[in-house]
Image (spheres, helix red, strand yellow):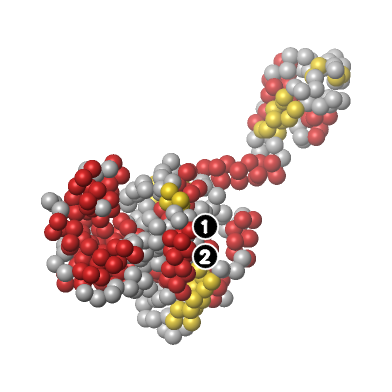
Amino acid sequence: MVVAAPPPATPVLEPVTALVAPSRTAPHGWTTYTVRDGDTLDGIAARHRTTVGALVARNHVRTPGLIHPGDRLSVPRTAAQAAQAAKAKAAAAGRVHVVRDGETMSGIAARYRVSLASLLKANHLSSRSLIHPGDRITVRGAGSAGSSSAKAAAGRPAATSRTHTVRSGDTLSGLAARYDTTVGDIARASRISSGSLLRVGQKLRIPVSAAHAVSDTFNGVKYPSSVVAAARRNHAILAKRSVPSRSEVRAIIVQTARRHGVDPRLALAVGSMESGWNQRAVSPANAVGVMQVIPSGGDWASSLVGRRLDLLDARDNITAGVVMLRALGRSAKNTEQAVGGYYQGLASVQKHGMYSDTKQYVKTIMRLRATM
């Protein structure tokens, strides 16, 4: 259907392009409008708060008196449309997180309240991929302070929480890092300001976010329900326990490694790589704690030290990892093969050689070792 516009009695093309500055008629940018039956250029211009001349110039309309249903015209955005587009663009682009020493993808996902799967996908990584200090990780879908998703998250109660009694030297940022949560979440749960000064003896509520729940799949492998159930039980126990801070874990690793004759820098590198020195880390395979020891590994380590080790206890967990490194070091032909055995299993390394991801794991451990 041909739609009539006002008679083109007055000059349109030359005077409009000469006199109209389209950018001034679209302070919020441009969007696309599809012409509908009955539309006219002056009606579309009025609806979008612009002029016929601006539309003609922007869309290179040769015959302003003729527009047809289905034609697509560039028209000025409203302020609301511009704001919505900006939010969509920001969400698509995401924010960038620069990896620090000891950080893991699961920890970064928890920090920004996004799923580990979506974080891995956004960065074209697998759950076995290694990250290094200085890497730039794109985080998509993390709500800003003013977004509706963030407000909804702020209003939701945490799945569980625990009480922390403030000790000398404690800070909100330090506690947030220790308990793998945020300053804002601790402040809200404790009903204090995020800028509050802490007092020794003060009781704080530490939320345990549902974002930390253990999934049932790792590296594309879905684990048996019994294994995942055990991992989730261990995760729930650790979520309510007091665990050492990263600085305390570091000291325990050094002390334990020296006691068992293992290079402390190697033990520190393995603990950093495996969990970021986080005793609350639990994988779907039920690898627990700082050194990410599975139950069968715990049994082996217990036999090596002559007593039952509790993998949920940070000191015992670190002891398990350290004595396993010591045993692997005695059986392997070199340190690199021992580290590969910690990741892949020494028998497998000796029989098949190191897999590609094992080689990358060993390379990263040796690089981290040099920085410890």
Q: Is residue 23 positioned above or below 369 on the image?
A: above
For badge 2, the amino acid type reads: Ser
Whether residues under marks 2 and 1 lie with C-beta atoms below 8 angstroms apart, the answer is yes
Residue 338: image location, x then y, percent: 19, 54
Q: Secondary structure at mark 2?
A: loop
Query: Could you classify mark 2 by the number of other residues whose Cα lies within 10 Å: few (under 14), some (14-19), or many (20 or more)?
Result: some
- Looking at the image, which is closer to me, 165 or 256? 256
Instruction: Inspect this view and state whether residue 249 appears.
Output: no
Q: Which mark is residue 113?
A: 1
Query: Could you classify mark 1 by the number of other residues whose Cα lies within 10 Å: few (under 14), some (14-19), or many (20 or more)?
Result: many
- What is the count of numbered marks? 2
Closer to the N terminus: mark 2 or mark 1? 1
Q: CA distance from mark 2 to mark 1?
A: 9 Å
- Looking at the image, which is closer to me, 271 or 151? 271
For badge 1, the amino acid type reads: Arg
Instruction: Inspect this view and state whether residue 317 appears.
Output: yes
Residue 171: image location, x then y, percent: 41, 73
- Residue at (69%, 27%) from the top-left corner? 74
